[in-house]
Amino acid sequence: MSPSQAQLGGFDQKIEVVIIPVSDVERATKFYTSLGWRLDVTPPWVVQLTPPGSGCSVQFGENLTSAPPGSATSYVIVSDIEAIRNALVAARIEVEETYHVTEDGPVPGLDPERGTYRSRATFRDPDGNRWWLQEITSRLPGRVDPAPASYTSVSELAGALWRAEAAHGEHEKRTGGRDADWPTWYATYMLAEQAGTELPT
């Protein structure tokens, strides 16, 4: 790594907005608000929406990009792909069937072990821009900055607590008794899961 690269790595550089190409701004606005995405306050010539819990927003509008409508592909990360897919289908959004990734290629259905990064499904907006739903419950090592853990929504925090509870139940079976200091164990598990480090047993 060059000195200039090392210096740049010391600055926060957060992706704020991704521009997506659409042909009909009003139609696209109705679609993305139907997903539950927040419509942000912007100048009149820009439409900006933010998914719940996301630190990054999407924008579209007249003459914001020369890319052809429908040419974008992006990921939406979720902690429970089955729940969000059911909610999208109930909102009359066409979502492809869930599949999971294996060493031999994609296989229909949820990953049997609900392994992080494995289960996926896709949907498209009216222009054909493709969104990949991907279930991530813990990050791979090296993919999380060494900063305090944070949860950006009730559902994300609740999911982490449910997984910690299940893992703690297995821990108590192995140790053969009730763990009176379960809050510390939960906290240790949840921090390790989010950081992608070794989980307690």
Image (spheres, rainbow, N blue to C red):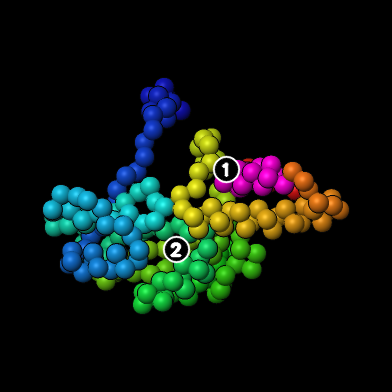
In the rendered view, does 166 fall on the left or right side of 33?
A: right
Please name the residue that numbered disc 2 is placed on.
Answer: 133
The location of residue 16, given as percent across then percent down, is 32, 44
Q: Residue furthest right?
A: 176
Q: Is residue 72 above or below residue 86?
A: above
Q: Is residue 188 above or below residue 12?
A: below
Q: Give residue 185's mark.
A: none
Q: Amino acid at mark 1?
A: Ala
The location of residue 195, given as percent across then percent down, is 57, 43
Quick check: can you spot residue 191?
yes
Q: Residue furthest top?
A: 3
Q: Is residue 1 above or below residue 114?
A: above
Q: What residue is at 81 percent from the left and 51 percent from the top? A: 178
Q: Which residues are magenta?
A: 182-196
Residue nearest the observer in this picture, 180 or 91: 180
Quick check: can you spot residue 66?
no
Please name the residue that numbered disc 1 is placed on.
Answer: 195
45 drawn magenta: no
Q: Amino acid at mark 2?
A: Leu
Q: What residue is at 57 percent from the left and 70 percent from the top? A: 110
Q: What residue is at 50 percent from the left and 43 percent from the top? A: 150
